[in-house]
Image: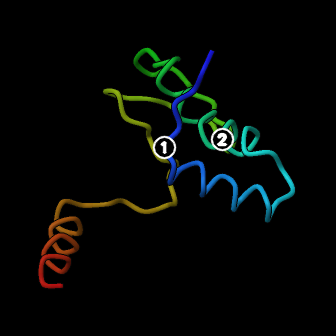
Amino acid sequence: MVLDISTDVMEALKKVSAKTNRSPGYILSELVRGPLAVITNLPEENEAVTLPDRTWIMEDGFPVFPSRGGVVTSEMVRKLRDESEDL
């Protein structure tokens, strides 16, 4: 098998490799492993998805974020959206 890796990506991998003392292949594998786990194991409704850093429950195809103790209202979302449009 031959991988066709863009020159700019390979250069970036080499830089990270030199800084971390890891092979470019190892760096690439670490970067790709999480996203590949997601797209190759798409969950059913309300099924847990475990990634390297946490476990998510999926609803309507989207991860449900854990509660931080507050309720996000439509008004809060509108206010943030309006503020970001002013930037």
**Quadrant location of the N terminus?**
top right
Residue found at the very far bottom of the displayed protein:
87
- Closer-to-camera residue (50/57): 50
Image position, residue 3 (x, y; %)? 57, 27
Residue under the image location 31 percent in, 27 percent down: 60
Which is nearer the eye, 68 or 55?
Answer: 55
User: Label 1 to label 2, Cα distance in Å?
Assistant: 12 Å
Residue 16, given in percent of the width and then of the height, sits at: 71, 59
The residue tagged 1 is 6
Q: Looking at the picture, does residue 44 appear above or below residue 14?
A: above
Name the amino acid, label 2.
Leu
10 Å crowding of disc 2: few (<14), some (14-19), many (20+): some
Q: At which x and y percent is residue 87?
A: 18, 85
Q: Which residue carries the number 2 mark?
A: 28
Instruction: Give amino acid for label 1.
Output: Ser
* Residue 24: quadrant of the picture: top right
